[in-house]
Image (cartoon, rainbow, N blue to C red):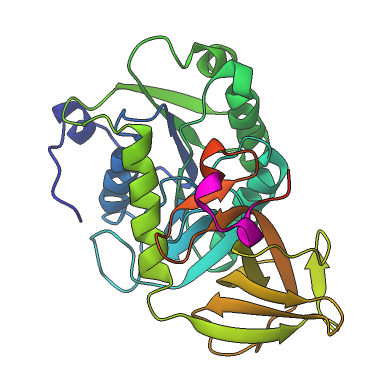
Amino acid sequence: MVHIEIPPYWEQLSLEGLSGVLMVIGAPDTGKSTFARYLYTRLCAFHERVAFIDGDIGQASLGPPTTMTLALRQGGETGFPPGGPRVRFFVGSNSPRGHMLPTLIGVHKLARRAQELGATVTVLDTTGLIAPEQGGPALKQAKVDLLEPTVVFAIRQGNELEPILGPLRRSARTRVVELPAAPAIRPRDMLTRRAYRARLFARYFADAYPLEISWARLAVFPAPCFSRYQLVAMEDRRGFALALGIVLEADPARKTVLLLTPAHSLQEVDALRIGDVWIHPETWEDYRAGDENDRRLPAAGRPNH
């Protein structure tokens, strides 16, 4: 596990007896994800099979951005990250804004998969989207209704979580544990977060090479309309992401697309899912449709607005 300064009120938490889904929420730069990882390591003392869902699609810790990753404890390990099986779901964006339905579908499918794999407790780290004007409270409350977490751990600086916590405190559907923001966390601006995503994409595609795919016999969601440098997921029959790829070329007449991908084969690929993010294969920076910075992309690779 990454060395962090553990606040004493984290160490004082009584975790014995907790099971099911434990959901962690909080604004960016509050220590939310750090606490989620700490929670995972503490739970390893009480459970043989512990799962962790990295649901922060913008600042992922277990996989490339735009995806959510389920990882399970292996053997008697106690550190983070988990070394066991991993399952991914492609949301197709680095933010749940405009992608709330796939975000909800993804966390539900991953939580269900964790249970199928024998996990008795699952830690869910969520995104930092909490602003009411952007739908943050509605998304968090929908996750509570869908996943029925045993506990919601709320990491807060002040009253920024009140639109979410107010109803939950008065409801019996989950228990709310409120914790102050971690004092040692350093704020990160948008450029720092963008650079972090670029490093993750560079790492993910480090061993990638061009792979031509014929989509004539594959499902393509939402439709086979490929754009240069667009991010695409190769999914299995259950809708989990086997690998990601960056569109290099597409030939509608032949119904083929050339992807830059670390995937070695098309075995088990059932469908292609087109995302709403474009990745520059030289800088590895990501761009979304309408992003004012997408002018840095070559003309053939710019999103269609």
Front-most of 155 and 256? 256
With respect to residue 142, does 301 lie above or below? below
**Relative height, residue 99 to residue 133 (above, below):** below
Quadrant for residue 231, please give it: bottom right
What's the residue at 58%, 30% (across, down)?
A: 140
**Residue 172 visible somewhere in the drawing:** no
Residue 102 in picture, x, y percent from top left: 69, 48
Q: Main secondary structure of the magenta part?
A: helix
- 299 in relation to 164, above or below: below
The C terminus - image quarter: top right
231 vs 8, left or right, is right
- Asked if residue 64 lies left or right of residue 92, the reply is left
| Observer-nearest of 72 and 137 | 137
Furthest residue toward front? 299
Residue segment shown in magenta = 295-302
Total count of labels: 0
* Residue 90 x/y as whole percent: 61, 59
